[in-house]
Image: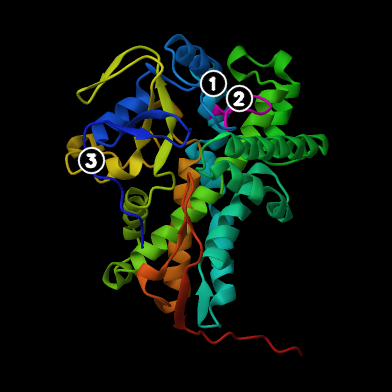
Amino acid sequence: MIVAPSPCGPPRRAMLPEGIDGWVASRYADVRVVLSDPRFVRDPAGVAHLRAAAGLGAVHGGRGVGRGATLLHLDPPEHTRIRRAVNPLFAARRSEAHRSTIDALATTLVGRCAGSGRADLVCDLAVPLAVGVLCHVAGLPYGDHGRFKAWVRAVHRTDSGSEAGLRAAEAIAAMDRYLEDRMAAEPDAGVLAELRTRARSSSTEPDGARLTEDEVIALGRDLLVGGYESTANLISGGLALLLAEPARYEGLRGTLIHAAVEECLRQVAPFPQLEARYAAVAVDLGGVRIAPGEAVVADVAAANRDPDRGSLAAESGHLSFGHGPHHCLGATLARREAHAAFHAVITGLDDVRLACPPEDLTWEPGLTPTLRSLPVRFTPRQICHRSES
């Protein structure tokens, strides 16, 4: 059902999705180093210089282009400055303020299915919940999902080579135009409105809070690319994992749902492998010398299952939201959405079971593998309608 991750071991040579030869780190300790050590960098201009100086080939792909650099493609001090400006917008207390909206949407979506006896938990729950929350938080019209979903998928594809890079670059340009139009339409609520206001009042903001228009567009692109599809995949993949083991599913109640969300994150990492980092200097990693300019991909799915991760994993047990300065900005929201979805299914549907063998579930490949459908059956509930007087 779920593609088994690669076995853990020392860093190994591989052809990477970026279309270049590089390294894959799969042990928990090694992945933590790659994600947090400042000797590994992301900035495309700096990477190009490093690789040219080392006589290495250029990196293909369109994920580092667009109006403004995304957070994923920035290094300190620029990354630190922008994260400091936007972190308050995604702090735990802000995410908690969205709790009632998230819970109500999950309950409504499940309630629409309760009388039918069957549902597809991808299109009936996971996707509309994740899209609805993204649009609510960002301040986007829900109906615009029909416009931006194809762009997001194009960026998430793992095809290598110049043609794939061109498709990704075209998708990024389309997202930028869309976000420019949304900003021009003067949104009055949501994160994008707050970011726009911050950019326009930058002359009065302290240095750490100043944002340019390009940086706001790039942050909006971050929200679209990372803000809903990965969460939908966590919800649908997590439910598939739980329903494949009925005893585990039936035991979910109360505080156990939180533990189930964390275990699903460990086993169904939304981004199994993270985009490459590049060694700024020679780095000894897990017994292997990584030369300057060489790329290293962090295999999170493998690291999450490393039997030797030990006390390093005591905090959460997984690296599915990353580690270090690039730790996922929306991690709290994603956890909240998964918890709401699991709770809504457990309390809103009776005798839920997969409508097909687990091995028949199909995943579409990509940076965030996507479950095509999750068909389930359950005992229909009587829907009572109030009679008109």
Mark 1 packing: few (<14 Cα in 10 Å), some, or many (20+)?
A: some
Closer to the chain start, of discs 1 and 3, is 3
Find the distance from the CA under tag 2 to the CA under tag 1: 9 Å
Query: Residue at coordinates 33% horizontally, 45% vertically from top-left?
Result: 301
Q: Is residue 353 above or below residue 202?
A: below
Residue 336 placement, left or right of 255: right
Dot 2 corresponds to which residue?
69
The amino acid sitting under disc 1 is Pro
Mark 1 highlights which residue? 44
Dot 3 or dot 2: first in sequence order is 3
User: Any magenta on residue 29?
Assistant: no
Towards the viewer: 251 or 289: 289
Q: Which residue is mark 3?
A: 8
**Amino acid type, mark 2:** Ala
Dot 1: what SS? Answer: helix
Mark whose residue sits in front, 3 or 2: 3
Q: Nearer the viewer, residue 273 or 236?
A: 273
Majority secondary structure of magenta residues: loop
Q: Magenta region: which residues?
A: 63-71
Q: Residue 156, position in %: x, y?
A: 54, 44
Q: Secondary structure at mark 3?
A: loop
Q: Are marks 2 and 1 in contact (CB under 8 Å)?
A: yes
Horizontal and vertical percent position of residue 78? 54, 16
Q: Is residue 67 magenta?
A: yes
Q: In the visual, does 354 lie left or right of 259?
A: right
* Residue 12 image-quadrant placement: top left
The local secondary structure at tag 2 comes to loop
Tell me the quadrant of the picture where the C terminus can be found. Answer: bottom right
Q: Residue at x 43, y 44 (%)?
A: 271
Kind of residue indicated by mark 3: Cys
Location of residue 154 (image quadrant):
top right
